Amino acid sequence: MSFLNPFMLFGAGAIAVPIIIHLLNRRRFQRVVWAAMRFVKVSTEKNQRRMLVEDMILLAIRCLMLALLALAVARPAMRSTTHNVFGQSKVTAVIVLDNSASMGVSDGVQMRFDKARKIAEQAVDALPSGSAAAVILASDVAKEVIKEPTHDLNLARKTVREAPLSDRATDLFPSIEKALETLKGRSAIRKEIYVVTDGQLAGWRQLGDIQKTLKTAKEQTGEQQVSAHLVLVGDAQERNLGVSGLVLSSGLAPLNRPLRFEAQVANYGKQESKDIKVSLLVDGASADEVTIPSIPPGGTRSVPLNTRFKTEGWHNVTVRIAADRFPGDDTRTLAVRAIREIRVLIVDGEPGTEPRESETFFLGHALVPVSAEETEQYYVKTSTIAPGDMTGTRFDDFDAVVLANVPDFSPDTASAMENFVKRGGGLLIFPGAKVNAAFYNSQLGTARKLLPATFGEPHGDAAQEEKFLTFQTKGYDHPIVALWNDANAGTLASTRTFRSFELNLLPAATGETEKSSVPTPTPAPAQTNAPVSFAAPKAVLRYSDGSIAMAERALGLGRVVMFASTADTAWNDLAVRPAFVPLLHRTLGTLIQRHDDGANVRVGAQFARRLTADLLHKDAVVMAPGAASGTRELRRVELVNGTPVLSYEATDKAGIYEVSIADPATVIKFAAQPDPSESSLSELPAEEVTALGQVVAVQRWHPTLNLREWVEKARVGAEFWLPILMLVLALAALETFLAQYFSRAK
């Protein structure tokens, strides 16, 4: 026997109330000098014993009523009983419904998620009358749809019936942990958790923690004990193809120029797939199509797809393969902004006596790799100045600035360069024999944290050709050089570097925002010296000996990239290699598209975009993919660290999100990409399911599954407050009758 509200037992102290009243109201007899006193005395002595018995009976009934009432309010219960004379005991339950992307797999008749919703509804129906239920949607986060257990079971049914399927990844542990937290401290003889999922292996990555947590809950005593039920609605899948990646491999997206996209298609099934048709769509219209001959089980193939953008602004770029039983990974979409032109300022540190001797001769031709007649129409517009002309130059008139063997410049120019990058500009640095390494390290590196690395000592001899370094031959992890993971794209390894500076990556800035996430908006006034987002420096490309050849870092809205060797052929022959033009253009694309970095996020990640000051405090209307016509969400542009920022966190669906602001008219698009891990439909192994059965009741879905019958067999325990309360009412009626009977005239 235990009590669900044990503190209410202190109410039994109210028994003292009728006793005190009885003592205060005892009949007292006064002495009266009267001739007939003898007759009064005889009469009193005759009735005194009868009245005392009557008073004691009423007092006992009243005390018993108060004691039983306190007992009923304390809710006595026995978990070991199986008697259901007064019906099953009330249950406090939490329904954990998996709504991750893999729940969208179909068996040809219905989706796993449809089955799961029906099972979850059965779980609500199986709860005894008077029970309470909470509902959690489980993906890689726990979304509490009904946070506090409600006694309105119709609301719980409606909630699971209308629950939406998301495109998020799966991790069940946070939701199970949240369910146990919800039940903690609740007053109920029975506490139950129902987990309805497909059993995808990826969702049980924290299986050990799940088993430990559920075992602890199961082994608790009294009302702290929690029973867990697991229903698996998944079935084995032999085939699944998915688009696992999509990138703009050409680096830039200029108008009316050939653009190359790289799509990755993976075979997650157990059989070889043949003749896979891969289609590229731009704004919904077909743009290109490629057929992959075959992909082995577990294999991945990359294919190039080409198109052109005919209008400036944002475009939806989608790769699609034939639909299968998991439609969630058959498409992948990017948001890409087409640009009309790019303005590049080149600072030539060694102009030379003739054009070919210029430090930037090859650089200028690589940036504009067209004939003189086509230069005017080309999207990259270059301007070249000498280092002495940097003072007074408006860097904000350009999208990117290139420093080629520039010795040094004034502190004012360095500050202007820093502000240019923070506001969204790109800076590209090539060293050379004239570079003042101490100036760059102290003024741009240490003082302003503008550089990704400091210059060390130069190594090598440019006067000979026998000893040289080459670039790495594989493992290109950075987006700038990822193109060369494909052997068909050529090679970087043929480049010979005879002399180069040692680049030493700077540590991540302390006390600053080093992650790409945007802080929570606060309505603080604009600050002159507002904190700036510093990303940790990264190596882009390495030499064959492991030393760094290229490094980059993001700073505010801009980015800085630096090379270890020269832009001309004085120290290396990169400038005359075929890879120089695509490498330079991909670098330029990374520099100027820093502002658009957050345009493509992982499903579930927060979208955040820094905007111009005229949009501060304006309302933005967000249209999510697949939203019903007329369904919109509002977000306000708020001040974050002195910068207007628009944030949107409800990215549960994959696809294109469109953001519009009325005044001034502004349209922004971003895309959410599904997690490729959801495409792997591997199930939790049978032995792991068996082990899980030691701490949770496991049941696999089948068409005739009766959840109520299954759980009621295991459900034991009952509360006894109802019969006690009925006894209190009976005693109250008896006390009323006896009080009237005893007080009648005798």
Image: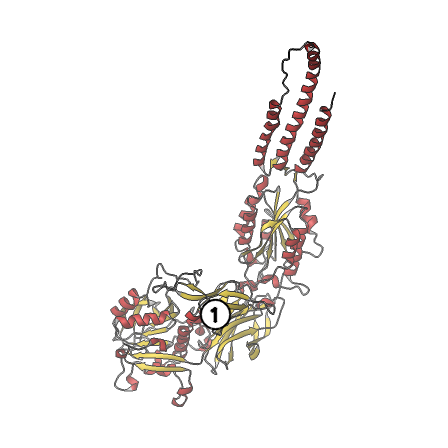
Left or right: where 380 falls relative to 358: right
Q: Nearer the viewer, residue 543 or 649?
A: 649
Q: Nearer the viewer, residue 42 or 193?
A: 42
Left or right: where 409 falls relative to 286: left
Q: Residue at x 51, y 80 (%)?
A: 307
Q: Position of residue 577 (x, y in %)?
A: 37, 80
Q: Quadrant of the C terminus?
A: top right
Q: Residue at x 67, y 25 (%)?
A: 58
Left or right: where 296 falls relative to 385: right
Question: What count of labels does the image hold?
Answer: 1
Q: Quadrant of the N terminus?
A: top right
| Residue 732, image quadrant | top right
Q: Where is residue 409 in the image (x, y as percent from the top left)?
A: 26, 73
Instruction: From this view, report whether residue 154 is shown above or below residue 345.
Output: above
Amino acid type at image mark 1: Ala
Write down the residue under mark 1.
599
